[in-house]
Image (cartoon, helix red, strand yellow):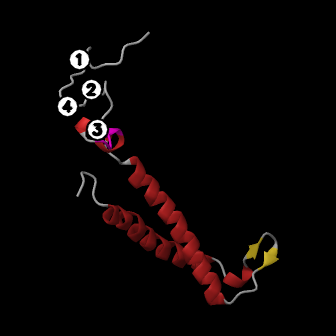
Amino acid sequence: MGEGGSIAQRLMWVIWPAFLVAAVAEAIFFTVFDPFELHFFGATLDLSREAIYAMGFFGFWALGIASSALTVFLERSPWEVNRCPLDGPQRPVGCPKREGAACGDADRLPQRS
C-alpha cells in the first residue's frame, strides 16, 4: 500500500462520510419541505413521495461525494504529486533522480544550444 492509502481506502474516505451527510441532510430538508410542494423549473413533480425522497437522497449524496472527493484530492502529499512513474534506469537522461546522476551532474544533462 502506498503512502496515501489504497484506491479502495480512499474511495471509502469519500463515499461513507458522504452517505452519512446525505442521510442527515435529507432528514432535515424533508422535515422542512413537503415533497409535493416542490417544483422543478416551475413544473410540479409528478412522482410518488418515495421517488422524491430517493432523488433527494441521491442528490445530497452526490454533493457530499463531490465535497469529500475534493478534500481527498487536496490532501495529497508532495511525494504523491511530484513522484515519477518511471524507475531510475527508465528515467530520461538528465533527470536528477536517474541512477548515478546527481543534480549537478553536467555530463548527463542535455546540452543547450
Counting from the top left corner in percent of width and height, residue 59 is at 58, 71
Is residue 84 rendered magenta in the image?
yes
Q: Which residue is mark 2?
A: 96
User: Reading the chain from its start, which is encountered first: label 4 or label 3?
Assistant: 3
Q: Residues within 10 Å of mark 4 (few under 14, many from 20)?
A: few
User: Reading the chain from its start, which is encountered first: label 3 or label 2?
Assistant: 3
* Rendered residue at 31%/40% (across/down): 83
CA gap, disc 2 and disc 4: 8 Å
The label nearer to you, 2 versus 4, is 4
Q: Is residue 89 above or below residue 61?
A: above
Q: Are marks 4 and 3 in contact (CB under 8 Å)?
A: no
Q: Which mark is residue 99?
A: 4
In this rendering, position of residue 106 left or right of residue 14: left
In this rendering, position of residue 109 left or right of residue 58: left
Toward which corner of the image does residue 17 lie, by quadrant? bottom left
* Rendered residue at 40%/64% (across/down): 14
Numbered disc 3: secondary structure: helix
The span picked out in magenta is: 82-86
Q: Are marks 2 and 4 in contact (CB under 8 Å)?
A: no
Numbered disc 1: secondary structure: loop
Q: Is residue 61 above or below residue 74?
A: below
Please name the amino acid that badge 4 sits on: Glu
Q: Residues within 10 Å of mark 1 (few under 14, many from 20)?
A: few
